[in-house]
Amino acid sequence: MHFRVVIPARYASSRLPGKPLADIGGKPMVLRVLERALQAGAESVVVATDDVRVQQAVEAAGYRALMTSPEHQSGTERLVEVAETLGWPDDTLVVNVQGDEPLIDPLLIREAARQLVLHDDAVMATLAHPIHDHADFINPNVVKVVADEAGYALYFSRAPVPWPRDAFAHDRTRMPEGRWLRHIGIYGYRASALQAFSALAPGRLEQIESLEQLRALEAG
């Protein structure tokens, strides 16, 4: 299986400026993420940044970094620029790995690409795992996903969905039996879909939930 990884690494984080270069065990965070991507078996890994300091740190370690526009509003837009700049064919599988995930399991990165291989009708893939903790289920910072029986996403939300009406009618303090899923923020794309996705205007649901992935569902 062939796939490429792009790591968006924005320097000017509002919460922690310079986060891509934060020291993690003697190395900049972005390099830790890059190493995980290589362990996943990616045929190439590119760091997409908006700051020369990040570019220099990556290149000094022997890896590839591309300067991208500081005007991008999301990591997906940086992926589009990288794919266009490097001339990747439309059938290229591209995995977006966030630059602040130094402990990400390489198997998850590989799985995002594998899902596109398994589902050749899909142009975008993401991951989820079961929720067992009630605190996670009701936490708006834990994004939930509702999927059909084939594993295709129906909706993403910060709210506890699907709402277990009967179980919560008796006790809302415990996690009921059933299958609830927590979204894992890693995405795989076919290069052909990147431009189309980034060209879409944010939809009403995306703006309400502040979840970029809803843009794809709203567009059908």
Image: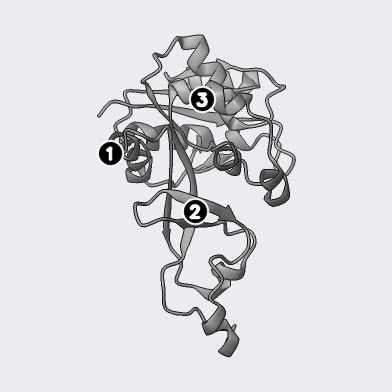
The extreme right residue here reads 14
The extreme left residue here reads 1
Label 1 environment density (alpha carbons within 10 Å; few <14, some 14–19, many ≥20): few
Asked if the residue under mark 1 is in contact with the one under mark 3, i.e. CB atoms within 8 Å, the reply is no
- Badge number at residue 118: 1
Residue beneath the point at 57% across and 56% down: 143
Q: Note whether residue 57 is visible.
A: no
| Label 3, label 2: how far apart the Cα atoms are | 20 Å
Closer to the camera in the image, 34 or 90: 90
Is residue 5 positioned above or below 97 on the image? above
The quarter in which the N terminus is drawn is top left
- Badge number at residue 27: none
**Helix, strand, or loop for circle 1?**
helix
Q: Which residue is under mark 3?
A: 194
| Label 1, label 2: how far apart the Cα atoms are | 19 Å
The reply, left or right, for residue 206 in relation to residue 66 is right
Is residue 155 positioned above or below 21 on the image? below
Q: Position of residue 125 (x, y in %)?
A: 42, 40
**Helix, strand, or loop for circle 2?**
strand
The extreme bottom residue here reads 170
Q: Position of residue 17 (x, y in %)?
A: 71, 36
The extreme front residue here reads 220
Report the amino acid beneath label 1: Leu
Asked if the residue under mark 2 is in contact with the one under mark 1, i.e. CB atoms within 8 Å, the reply is no
Label 3 environment density (alpha carbons within 10 Å; few <14, some 14–19, many ≥20): many
Marks 3 and 1, the one that precedes in the sequence: 1
Q: Which residue is under mark 2?
A: 183
Q: Position of residue 140 (x, y in %)?
A: 64, 61
Q: Note whether residue 170 is visible.
A: yes
